[in-house]
Image (cartoon, coloured by chain):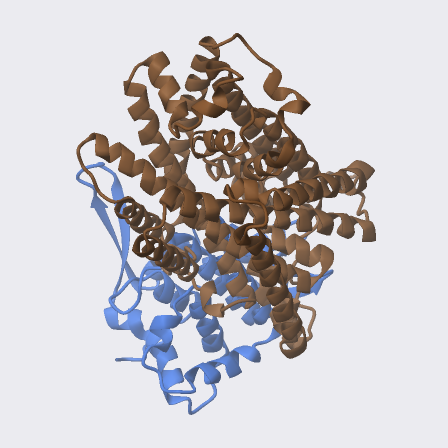
Amino acid sequence: MSAPSPASAVQSALARDKLGTFSLLHFSLTAATPLTVIAGGVVVMFAVAGQIGIPLGYVIIAVSLWLFSVGYTAMARHIANAGAMYAFVARGLGRVPGVAAAWVAATAYCALQISLYGLLGITAQGLFERTGLSLPWWVFALAAWVLVGLLGTRAVDINAKVLAVLLTVEVAVILLFSVSNFAHPADGLSFASLSPSALGGEAAGAVLALAVIGFIGFESPTVYGEEARDRKRTVARATLATIGILAVIYIAASWSIITAVGDDDVVAASADPDLMFTLAGDQLGGAWVTIGQVLLLTSVTAAALSFHNTTARYLFALGREQVVFSWLGRTSVRTCAPVAASVTQTAVGGAVLVLWAVLGLDPLVHLFFYLGTASGIGLIALILTCAIAVLTYFARDRRDESVWAAVIAPVLAVLVMGGVMYLSVIHFHTLLGVEEGSLLPTLVPILFGALALLGAGWGLFLKKARPEVYAGIGHGAKAPLVQAAERAAVPVGAAGE
Amino acid sequence: MPDAPTPRLVYDAYLITAYHDFYKPAVAPRVIGLGLGAALLAELVFSGHLAVRSHEGRDLVVPEPRGGPPRDSLGLWLTELVQGEPDALAVSQWLEYLAIADTQTKTAEHMVVAGLMVRGEHRSRWLGKVQVTYDAADALIAQAPLARLRRHLSTMDRRMPLLDAFLLALTEAVGLSKPLYSQMPPGAREYAEGHLRVLPAPLQAIRGHLTAAVADTAITGNL
């Protein structure tokens, strides 16, 4: 009988240092900031859609993203640098579509982050007015912008601890408010909001697009794939658990609001943007209104910080790949944070805030809502393109994945995300609250399309003029290895593929 | 400034990355660990105790049968670890391991024995914990490695030694390009690039994996 091979001391030490499912879940949930979605988004959805099918919208999007995640996490098991969706597009559809996706993704994340300053400014303005301090919204937005800009250039683990505390308090308060709403029903527990007829007409696309934005952050466990303890399982588990947990919170909270106000009155009641807190104040006492608003303020700040970091990492990875300006790939020596990308994102955000303040635009409608929903269109397009990339990737070679993970789920994901994309675009005018045929709803998809075309054009230019840079597209942090191998034409093992 | 040669690449890497002075910023702790790990690997590859072989797209670190055991405890520690592995591990895995194996303290202790550093202990008034510090025995010697690299870049008059070229690559990879190239004459970067391009494949691989590991740290944070 042969002796068993001795265990690897180094691999055992490395395994102890790896992240488990709960750690990955922590990163993805902190990126989602649910109170911002519930208090800032759900009430707006009732008002915009004019119907009660919001919980059903969350059910549909949760199922769609679950289907998408099956193939997405399966593909993540087979590619290095599975950090960002554009990397999946680059590996599945090719590098040129990859660059196009990267440009759309960076712009969409950037716009989403900046839009949050509008909600933040208006929330802080209302809160501070109660204390007698009356200042314009942009003062508070700029204060938050400075804070986010400073934290963004610090080490990520500091941010993660801040976000973790905020998340725990947020979820506890949402659950408390939801239980209270269910305990104080207007007309008893109603299931009408989950009926298929509750979601339809020209508002369906608006509801679905807004619901997708609430789940953004679900894709982040793949960023930590190489740090995961059991990469084949933990990333998939954490991604699916994120979608499941967020779905339960969103469905329960939105359903609880309908239950507390009543099926027939909730749309009218949503004229009050603080509806969630007003209900809590009536049921639990006036102090909870202030507590809720303070927490909403910290939640939106956390969301702004989270999306700031996501955008900065996107820009950093693109800088390292030299797909955009290479100086974006610079890190801070002291903290190793992607400082150049972070400062760039801060500068763009600052410019938008100053412009909005100078032009006197409305922070809630013109900044939070217009920019946020426009970014939603870009993100849905990104998820759809990524779903197609997953399908194409496994169509070439199934790589021992099950038929469900490699074929059935990706096909269903493409169909449902395609449907969501179609409805979101044709109903975009409802989303923006403008007339059908207006310029703005047409302009946003055209802008994203133009951006994708420009990105693809840049990709083609790199292919011809700078083949070594082109070879590194989609490899993120590992791009220099691939580029070096391309330059030297020697077999330096690059990405472990 | 004296060009006092410290005897080893890993010592030079320590003085550049982990020894803080007025002329360069402090480097993030994980990046110091990655940089020192890369220096130690490169040193053992250069001395013929270890080799980097490309196999199925991975750069594996393997023991070099021709070389005898290293004479110092630091090199011996790593060489024995490499030899003790049932299967060869990749450069990236070794860098990751060396970053968490407190290579910084091991190197500093080694430099204390070599007379280059002085170990100090301070008890924190508030926490009551003993803090260990390592200070250079001679501040001028501590600045010598970076000064030597800068002199290569400013004179550009002769071929840079191979280990100095790797040290330059390492200094860039950990993010210290600014203090390295500050006030250098035009053409310094091209001069450096010319040397980095012709690094032997194993050192090139270690450099590439170090750069990628630092970028990974920036993307995922100091996990």
**In the image, A63: left or right of A210?**
right
**Coordinates of residue A354 in the picture (x, y in percent):** 32, 56
Q: Position of residue B70 (x, y in %)?
A: 52, 63
- Point out the image quarter for the N terminus of chain A: top right
Q: From the viewer's perspective, is residue A314 above or below residue A277?
A: below
Instruction: From the image, state the color of chain A.
Output: brown
Observer-nearest residue: A377 or B93?
Answer: A377
Classify the position of the C terminus of chain A by image quarter. bottom right
What residue is rendered at 65% in x and 37% in y?
A65
The one nearer the camera, B175 or B97, is B175
Provide residue B48's location: percent of width, then percent of height.
58, 69
Quadrant of residue B31 in the image? bottom left
Q: Is residue A9 visible?
A: no
Q: Is residue A63 visible in the rendered structure shown here?
A: yes
Foreground of the two, B85 or A440 = A440
Question: What is the number of callouts on the image?
Answer: 0
Chain B is shown in which shade? Answer: blue
Residue A337 rendering spot, x and y as whole percentages: 41, 55
Which of B95/A129 is in front?
Answer: A129
Q: Horizontal placement of A444 versus B30: left or right?
A: right
Which residue is drawn at the image coordinates 56% and 70% (left, top)?
A: B203
